[in-house]
Each structure stands twice: as structure tokens, then as C-alpha cells.
Image (cartoon, rainbow, N blue to C red):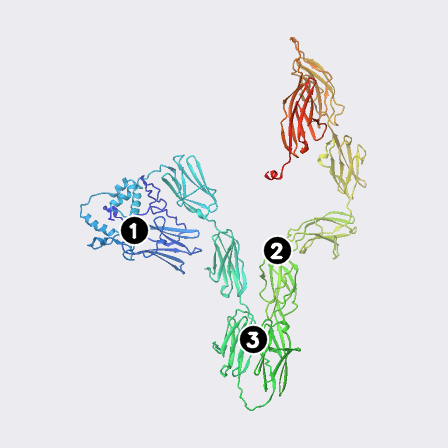
Amino acid sequence: MPEPKKPGAKDKKVEAPPADKPSEDDGGCDELPEDELVPGEEPQMSQISGLFVEKPQSVTAVKGKNVTFVAKVDSSQMLRKPTMKWLKGKWMDLGSKAGKHLQFKETYDRNTKIYSYEMTIVKVVDGDAGGYRCEVTSKDKCDSCTFDISVEAAEETQQTNILEAFKRSGDAGEDAGELDFSGLLKKRERKQKEEPEIDVDVWEILKNAKPCDYEKIAFQYGITDLRGMLKRLKKMRKVEPKKSDAFLKKLDPAYSVEKGKKIQLNVELSDPNAQVRWLRNGQEIKPSAKYIFESVGGIRKLTINKCTLADDAAYECVVGEEKSFTEVFIQEPPVTITKMLDDIHVVVGEKVEFEVEVSDEGANVKWMKDGVELSRDGKYRFKKDGTKHWLIINEATTEDIGTYYVYTSGGESKAELEVEEKELQVLQSIADLTLKAAEQAVFKCEVSDEKVTGKWFKDGVEVTPSNRIKMTHMGRTHKLVIDDVKPEDAGDYTFVPDGYALSLSAKLNFLEIKIDYVPRQEPPKIHLDTTGSFVNKNTIIVVAGNKLRFDVDITGEPPPTVCWKKGDMELSEAEGRVRVETRKNLSCFIIEGAERSDEGLYHITVTNPAGEDKADVMVKIVDVPDPPENVKCTGVGEDSASIQWDPPKFDGGVPVKGYLMERKKKGSSRWTRLNFDIYESTTYDAKKMIEGVLYEMRVFAVNGIGMSQPSASSKPFMPIAPTSEPTRLTVEDVTDGTCALKWLPPERIGAGGIDGYIIEYCVEGASEWVQANETPVEKNSYRVRGLPVGEKMLFRVRAVNIAGRSPPAVMAQAVTIREIVERPKIRLPRQLRTKYIKRVGEKVNLVIPFQGKPRPVVTWLKDGAPLDTKLVNVRTSDVDTILFIRQAAKEHSGQYTLSVQIENMEDKVTLEIQIVDKPGPPIAVTVTDVWGFNAALEWKPPKDNGNCEITGYTIQKADLKTKEWFTVLEHNRRPSCTASDLVMGNEYTFRVFSENICGMSDDAGISKNTAVIAKTGLKQKQQPYKEKDMCSSPKFITPLIDRSVIAGYSAAISCAVRGHPKPKIIWMKNKMIIGEDPKYLMQNNQGVLTLNIRKPSLFDGGKYTCKAINDLGEDEVECKLVVRVITEKEEAKK
């Protein structure tokens, strides 16, 4: 399009509005809202993480030229690779448009840990103008930035052919891209320039126009950068800010909340009845348990519960056409380490697992070694389960030695890894060989590690394989085989294992033989090679499971016959595990996979016509030893345990060098090695254990061949230490021959608890302690009996638990065993120092402690006389006496005297017991005077006062017409009173109740005479009274109703009748009178008649009749009763 005609319209780059106040063209015909976005633009995210090292910059590109944008991101603080998006406008993802026009490139610098992202636009066209955004995200971190592209036309030569102006964009030929009319428009622009210019201010036109006319005006005046125009127009409008019509108070620019907490967004509307919509990243939010909408007057609230990182977004409140924006930032609390790393010590080749536990399940951790971050590759593996994280090294090497760190957002931990070289053992060395021409040379050795590789050298020069020379490695065995031996093969051969300072050497001797063609006979001769596998004369040692090949050179002419025997059994040359192979001048004895049964003495015999020769070969099979036996725990400590075991029954033919120990917690499957160096003894003290945790142990035996299978696990044992000594050991009591001790529990008890205490004593000056109790006592006191009277004794106490006895708590001073005379003293409880009152029938249980030594004599008296044990029970112990009455009666009242006496010393106390009950009624209640509306009453106290003082009287009156009683006075203390406010014309009677501390008497004293309140000055004219005749014959006013009932469920039928005199009621069933059958209950309540039938059966069905009869007549009603049995189907429906 043509450029705008005013200079103000030719700006190539318009300054972007602030990120916290985005604008937008809503496309309507209203004024452009202040808080809306420009099309193709969204609010910039706050650079809370600052991930960008370099941001792309806004440019003005020349049409047809290439332009490149570069963004660089720092990944040093990221746990994973960041994700980059290139966007145009608001939502268009340019990644899907990659091709010849848009090209993307990504590079990574390992030294600086910076990712570089490039976007290249090839041959820029007008359609590329606009706003762009690049956005980088990595787990919980994000950053974004915006930039603009303005396109300006390049100067072109005049085209003579107008059709050339219709060109297509792109490089794929005449059919590629879209039609581009820009060339044609530019030509027409030159023609228009020749016309006289009109002075028009486009910005004044736009400021006064409606937003729906912006595009039309821009096209008319040649403005191609619509987005830049809207930005500049918005900036011009900021001079005159417009107040929002819908919002009185908008959302804050940003909110911040911790993860897991809730946040509330508030707006205030000018119209309390207006409807609002809440949007999150442009998507409408629906009410739910997480999002709660509230409306209070003109205030609208959005509450977000339990915020997560997913709630970190842009939020909008929309009222009609107006909007209010904000951003919510979620702050994640720091992740702390709850279980630190432990140092690990392993051998080369073993698996290493570093374990750490953090406070949050969703947390990420970073592993580093010696300051270098570790990544997931073939060597390191990372594992995560809930809050636990592991760093795993499958096969440790010496290069892995170092310090390992783990970092979280709120903590760090480190641990050392130590890796020891694994000692390589030679199980079978190579032997010297002496061979003739064309024979085969086999050098063989065996080492303890199957994974060890090595190299062969001849006279210091590495041997290279060929068709004649072959090197093999199978399991623990390494072989060098030379076929068709030649004189140049003679020399020193050495095998050097890789990674070990070890070498095995042997010599190959070449034997030259001159052939004598003179036929002759030579006696057979066996040539045993005493080197190589022989440890001493004629003895071969073979490791169980290995292959034995024993070559025996044989000479003699003619070639002799060879026979191998073990005992009386001849070994055949057939195929088998134990076999013999015979060649010219050579006999090979082979055992495949040697077993213990192959051990023994073997005989070889060679014969030919010239003679015979014999030799014996002893084959000894050696193996790893059997597992140790009887692994058991012989003692435990606070964090240690003593382990003992028996040596293996079979040592594998080789002396046992020592043992390796492992332990594990009961229930766990992970064994922990306790020693890496061989331990020679059969007892071991395991340390660094946790008190109170059950452990199991197992032991491996090691000899020169290898390590045995593990022994059977020991019985579970628990490291427990004995408790500390008991505290505060004191003497509670001493008598002739006994001493009572008491103490407090130990200060430190531990996980084993306390099973009891052992008490010991000895005579002062002696050293022999005697145990006083056979079994531990659980209480913290004990009386030692059988002590010699007059002796000075020492005492001590030990606590006992599963770990054994604690150190003793010893009495500081000796105790003389002699009764101490103590004056008797009664300690009367406070409640017994005054009169002790109980009601009749209640229980009396008095416990009175006393003291005195020796045990005093206790005597009870009642009113000065000995106590009757039939009425009162007395129980006396060494320290107290108990007076017990099961049901108190009035005769139990009186003065009780307790006497405690030791020899001529005595102590006495007296206590008074009073058993009370309700009083009897007052007597001789009389109305002594009546005047006006008052009446005077007098009475005498009751004969029975309930064994306590009368506290008052309650007086009641009753009108002889109604005979209803009303209280006149309460708690009257005198035996007389005056009743007032009586009603004229009524006659009253009175009754009086007596009261004491137990309450009112059950019966009342009733007045012997009455009080008549006479009328004064009035005379009643009596009307003749005619009594109405109320007699009538019986008449049923409510009939019986037919009923259907269920068998087994009680039923009732009812009716109502009236009549005077009261009629007699007769119930009948099927015209038969129902008598006193207990199955039927007949009731008559004020004329309502009911017949109850208890659990009716089919027999009870029929016609029931109710008949009422009196002297004036009779009446009857009847009904039908059906009894039905419920079926299974009906019951199933219920």
C-alpha cells in the first residue's frame, strides 16, 4: 500500500505500550477501551526468571531482503532443556510455518550452557510486518519478550509491462506463494504524486473516528502497519484518560501467592446488578470447588483455592464490553532435604546408590560431582519415588571417587564415594612347555574375575593373532594357542591382565628331533611334566567346575598302548565328561567341569612288545568352601552386637583365609557388607547399629579359590543396652528380720524397657552379695525378709531387661536390722473430726490411718462398750483400720472410740456417727380458730424426728368441693400457722408435713376438723332442683369396620357405645361368646371398646360381634376379620 501522506504517518517503529497496560482493538463501534489489547498482542509476562541473555530487537526490514532474529537463553539454573516458541500476533505459532520462507536454528554451547535460537525470514514481504513474541519455558520457569517488524519498499526501476506487477511471493516458481500487488500499487503511487497534495491530518481523523472505521481510514490514506497505528493512537489518547463506566475499582496489576494457599481477586462495579465473566488466559472460568464466585452488592470476588503452578496465568474480569486485567504469580516454597546423603564405600564393579529424601513429592533435585552437574547418560541413572530420589552408578570405577552433591531449592547435602580396587587372584598360572615341531602349544591361565581382559606378550612384544596363533577368553580362563609350533615360536610368554600390576610368565622350549630310520625297539616310557598343574610330585590341583586337560608324553617303539584307571575302573576313550584322548606319543586325560567325586588316585599304564611302564597321578579337586554354620548373636550392646559362628565343614580343599560379614534389618532385603578386608577370627563385633531395631547377620567363608555361598541368616537380634542404675534407693521401714526398700526407675531406660529389679544384700564388711528375690520384681519397692537381727546390712538394686542387668544402685550407709519403737499416733481424717452423718440404708466405710512400731493393738468401742462385730465390720492392717457398715440403721448411731496401743503407750480418738432418716408426720393437727378469710392451725411435733432435728413444716389446704391440695406455707419452723386468703363460702381441710435434713415426711398429719368460711350479709334463694333423667338404652355411635390382617402380627378392632346406666359389653366370635381367653384383651375406656387379638392365625378369622346390654335395652355391631399369610414373593418385594 502507499505510505501515508503526512510525515507523522511515516514512522517506521512505534514505541510499544507498557507491559502492565496492554491495549486491544475490540472491533466495535465504541471508543477504544484503555485496558484492552491491540490485535495480535498479549500482555508481556513479567520477567520473573530473567532467562534471556540476549533478546531479539525490533527492526525495519527492506522488502525482498532476509532478516534474522537471535534469542539466547541461560540454562545453568535449569534442570532440563528449555522450550522456545516463536509467535506472531497473539496466538499464531510460527513453528508450524517452517519452510523456505521461515527458517529456525538452535545451537548449544556446553561451556557457557547457553542455548541460541535463530529465526530467519527469507525475502521479507509486506505480510511479515507486525508484532512478534518469543516465549521460553522450562518446567516452572518462563520468560518472554516482544519485538516488531516494519517493512519498507525497495527502490525499483520502472516496469514497462503492467503484468509484471502481478508477481507471486516465494522461490518455488510461478505458482508459489500468494499474489503480491504491491508492485502495481507503488507504480500508481508515482502517478498520484504528480497530483497536488491536500493537507490532511490523518491522526486527527483517526482520533475523532470510531474504532470500526480505523481499517477503512488506514486503507484510504495508505497506512500498512495497522498495529503500529493503533499503538500510536493509543499513546496519543493517553493524554486524555477516560474513566471506566463499568468499574469503580479494577483488579490490581499483579497478585502473588504461595503455592497451596488461596487468593482472592476483587473488583467493584458501578452497577450492582451487572453480570461479570472471569477468564483465565482467555478461557472462561466456570464455578467449582477450586474457583468460587461471590457477589456482595457491587463487589465481585473470585477465590482460587489451593493454588498450583498451573494457576500462574493472566486473569480478566469482563463486564459487557469492558475488561480488567491482572496476572497471578505462584511462589513455590523452598524444598528442603529431610534425609541426608550417606557416605558409600564399595569395590570396583559394584553398584552404587545415593539416596536422598526431600520435603515435597513434586520437587526436582540437581546432582553434581565435584562441582560438575551430572546428566542422565549410560553411566548415571536417576530414580524418583515420591519424596525419595536416587543417583545410581551401575558399575563403580576408581574414576567415580569424589564428593557428590544434591541440591534443592531450599537445601543441599553431600557424601563421599570411595571405590577400592578389586584384588585379582590367580587361580591357575601358565606352565612351561617343551614341544616338538608341528605340535600345538597351549598356554592357559585362570583368574578370579570373569570380566578381566588382558594381553599376551612374547619376549616383551605383544602377540598378534593370526591363522596359526589364536587368543581366547572364556569366563575366568585365558588361552593362547599356537598351532604347528616352529623353532621361531620358542621364547618367554607373558599374560598381563588389564588394569592390574600383575603378570604371568612361562617358557616355550622347542625340541628338535633327528629321525633315525634304523628300525629299533624301545621300551615304553611315561614322561610326567612336574611343572604346571603339579603342586608337588604327581599331584594335580583342579578348581571345581573347571576343565582339566592333562597331557602325558609317551615314548616307545613301537608306539605303546595306554590304559588309564581309577581304582579298578578303566577309563574309556569314548565321549564323556571324564575321558581319555590318545594321539601319537601323547595321551590326554580330560575332565569337563571337575566335581568333588573326581578326586582320587589315577593309574596310567603303557605297554609295547619291548616292555611296560606305570605312573600314578593324584587329582585333587579344590572348591570354594561351604558356608559357615551356626551364626548366632552372643551378646548385644547399645549400638553393637557380638557375632559367633562355626567354620565350614568343608574348606574346599584349600585352607580358609577368613570371613566376610553382612547384616540387614529384619524385613528388609538389602544386605550391607561390614568388612572389605578378610576377617580371620570366628567372632566379630558389629558396630554402628541402631538400638531397638531387629537385625540379621550372615557370613561368607573365603579361601584361595573364592567366596562361599552365604550362611543361613542368624536369628533376629536387637542391639539393646542395659539401663542405667536405679535412683534414690532409700529405706522405707525396718523390723526385726526385715527391711523395706524403695527406689525410682533409672534415668536412662532405652529401647529394651525394664523387665524388673533384682535386690541384693550383704553384711557390712563382707564381699559376698546374696540375691533376695528369685524373679525380678516389677514394683519400685520390696521388703527383704530373713535378715539377721542386729546386723548391719548393705543393700543394692539392679534393673533387668533383655540386655542384662544394669549397674547397681548401692545404699550409701549400712542399715541396722532392729525394730524401731515408734509412739502410736492416729491420723484422723478431716471429715471425721466433726459429726459423721449418713442416711438409713447407705454404706459406711471409714478408713483411719495410724502409725507406730512395732505393730500396735487396735481396739474399737461404741458408747464405752466393746463393738458388736455382728452389726459392724472392722478390718485392721499395719498402717490403718477400717470401720465398715454395709447398710446403716438408726441403731448404728453413737460415739465410737478408737484406741491404738503399744505396750504402755496409747492414742485415742472419738468420732460420732449419726444415722438419719425422714421424720414421721406431725400429730394432733387442729383448726383452732376461724375469722374472716383466715384460719389458725396448731399441731404437735412428730413422735419420730428421723434421729435429727426438725427443720420446718409444710402446710397444705384443700377445698372439700374439689379436694385438690395447695401449699399454704413452706419451711414453717413453728408448730402453728395462720392460713389466709381463703374463699368465702368454702369449707377447707388442712394437712401438715414435717421436714428434716433428709427431706419431708412421707405421710402428712391431717386436721381433725375443718374451717368453714361463712358468707356475711348474703342469702341465697334456693331454686327447686329437678334432676334430669339421663337414662338411655345402649347405642353404638361408632361401628366395627371389616379388617384384613397379616398372620403373626397383633391386631385390634374398635367401636364406641353410649348408654346409662353403664351397659354390659359382650364380645362374640362367630356368635360364640369370647370368655377369659388370654389371646384376647378387652378394654373399655369412656365408652370406646377395643378388642386386641394377640398374633392372630388363620383360625382367628371370622365374624366378630360386640353387644351392649343394660336395663333399658341392648344394641350390637359386627364386622368381618380376614387373616392372610404373607407369601415369599411379597416378602422379597419388601
- Amino acid type of the residue tagged 2 in the rendering: Val
| Label whose residue precedes the other's in the sequence (2 or 3) | 3
Where does the image place residue 1057, in percent across and percent down from the top left? 65, 22
Nearer to us: label 2 or label 3: 3
- Amino acid type of the residue tagged 1 in the rendering: Gly
Q: Do the numbered discs 1 and 3 sit on residues whose CB atoms are within 8 Å?
A: no
Q: Is residue 182 visible?
A: yes
Q: In the rendered view, tell whether residue 131 sits above or below residue 378.
A: above
- Amino acid type of the residue tagged 3 in the rendering: Ser
Real-space Cα separation, disc 1 to disc 3, in angstroms = 82 Å
For residue 693, the mark is 2
- State the SS at label 2: loop
| Label whose residue precedes the other's in the sequence (1 or 3) | 1
| Label whose residue precedes the other's in the sequence (2 or 1) | 1
Residue at the (50%, 61%) spot, across then down: 403
For residue 127, the mark is 1
Residue 277, quarter of the rendered image: top left
- State the SS at label 3: loop
Where does the image place residue 1064, in percent across and percent down from the top left? 70, 22
Q: Is residue 1097 visible?
A: no
Question: 192 or 227: nearer the eye?
Answer: 192
Where does the image place residue 1095, in percent across and percent down from the top left? 67, 33
| Residue bearing mark 3 | 429
Real-space Cα separation, disc 2 to disc 3, in angstroms = 48 Å
